[in-house]
Image (spheres, helix red, strand yellow):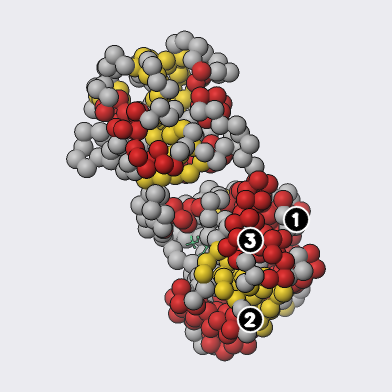
Amino acid sequence: RVLVMDFGSQTAQLIARRVRDQNVFCQIVRCDLTADRIKELNPKGLILSGGPASVYSEGAPRVDPGVFELGIPILGICYGMQLMCHLMGGEILPAESREFGRAACSSKNSNRLFNGLPETFNAWMSHGDQVGSLDGMFEVIASTKTCANAAIQHKDRPIYGIQFHPEVTHTEFGAQLLSNFVRDICGCSGAWRISSLIEQEKQIIRDKVGNNRVICGLSGGVDSSVVAALIAETIGDQLSCIFVDNGLLRKGERDQVEKNFTEHFKTDLHVVDARDRFMNELAGVDDPQKKRKIIGKVFIDCFRDEAKSIENAKFLAQGTLYPDVIESGANPDGPAATIKSHHNVGGLPEELGFELIEPLRDLFKDEVRRMGLELGLPEEMVWRHPFPGPGLAVRCLGEVTEERLSIIREADAILIEELYAAGLYRDIQQAFVVLLPVQSVGVMGDARTYENVAAIRAIESEDFMTADWFPFPHDVLQRISTRIINSVRGINRVVYDISSKPPSTIEWE
Ligand code: XMP
């Protein structure tokens, strides 16, 4: 595997993903790991990420200079390159101005790093400082107009530095360059596959679980479904799944989960019908935060009650993903915690007393999807848009009632059907209907109507931290609107939400 040392870069995760695209396993570690620890971890290569600091600023992150003596191939990107040169005697020029954007980069000689790349290619720059003079140890292997030392190589060691960012798609041939580094220079075989990971995780699960029973909470979403499918394949009837029907689900969601996990995976599935319990607790509540709190609490109560009825259960399986692990700071070798902008409702508290199994903790979302497909989960489940823990309750603005939920469910199903029909479902990362607590006047036939307004939300997003509204073709919007107004009783007006995040959020509550 290859390790990415993180100097606070916004693209450290992207670097790791791009390396994994080369079928090479890659993990992100903190930048202050000692050379001894790195040696113990025994990576085939190291990538030093970019970062916002200047090597001269106080408290700028450093790396143990011992890593340069380990004989492991190293690629420094942007700040990573500057730091490397700085520690090995080169001179870093403070920024007079920032360079940001594409620059034509020409490689000076045929270097292994640039194998298969044209002599000149567009590289994406985003830096202030740059490497000025090189100490005698390095030689220049590529330049741009404004950056003489755009890429460098150590004269006797497999240590490289590049000022540009090969991990972003704006850099042409970035994938080829990373492949040259990890496959050719580091000698990684490129044999890392989802299928080998599945086998590896199965073995870990078997060793850990023994004859005990594992509980897995299903939500209908892709992460928990993949966890359950993986464990079901590994230990069969030692797995019990709990699915809490809180009455706040999308149309057909419960049926789909039941069908998959009783027919296909033949799991011991406990469906807790808690619809009345949730509705009773939510009656009369219209404050968004209160709704969330109630739903979170009732969910945990229901889950706990059901879990008690399952004998011998020692483990709880959860669909924690790699980005959550990175952001939580939970891994001692991983980078420090960052603050998440929202908290998931539906997370289970530690005091439930189970030992955790988290077989997806090394995976990015797209890898989880690939794993799901490989395990035989249906496409529509694997590609399903994310759905918040509090479900339709946060899309039913104001008080949640059965009647309003059923209006949303019908309208939402039409929206999703039309997205599939238009071939747009996968271009959009999340789309749903919000029922507003507003009535407006309309006319149907000869009669005046006074009914609800529904808003459509559809967004494009990489990571759900920022998002843009989707630029729908007008005819698709028109079909969605006409079908909803004609066939969903209770809605006489449809509006489209054209707000980006920030400043708006994706959900309305
Ligand atoms: P916002 O509305 O914060 O949403 O822009 C970002 C993403 O998170 C989902 N979301 C939630 N997921 N529990 C969840 O499990 C929640 O309480 C929650 N609130 C928002 C939202 O659907 C979007 O994908």
Q: Secondary structure at mark 2?
A: loop
- Which residue lies at the image location 42% right of the left edge and 15% below the top edge? 141
Q: Secondary structure at mark 1?
A: loop
How would you rate the neighbour count of disc 3 (Cα within 10 Å): few for under 14, some for 14-19, many for 20 or more? some
User: Nearest the camera: 63 or 500?
Assistant: 63
- Which residue lies at the image location 38% right of the left edge and 16% below the top edge? 156
Q: Secondary structure at mark 3?
A: helix
Q: Amino acid at mark 2?
A: Ile
Q: Position of residue 288 (x, y in %)?
A: 47, 75
- Mark 1 vs mark 2: give the one in front: 2
Q: Residue lying furthest top in this view?
A: 109
Q: Is residue 432 visible?
A: no
The quadrant holding residue 436 is bottom right
Above or below for 93 versus 306: above
Q: Position of residue 438 (x, y in %)?
A: 55, 75
Q: Amino acid at mark 1?
A: Gly
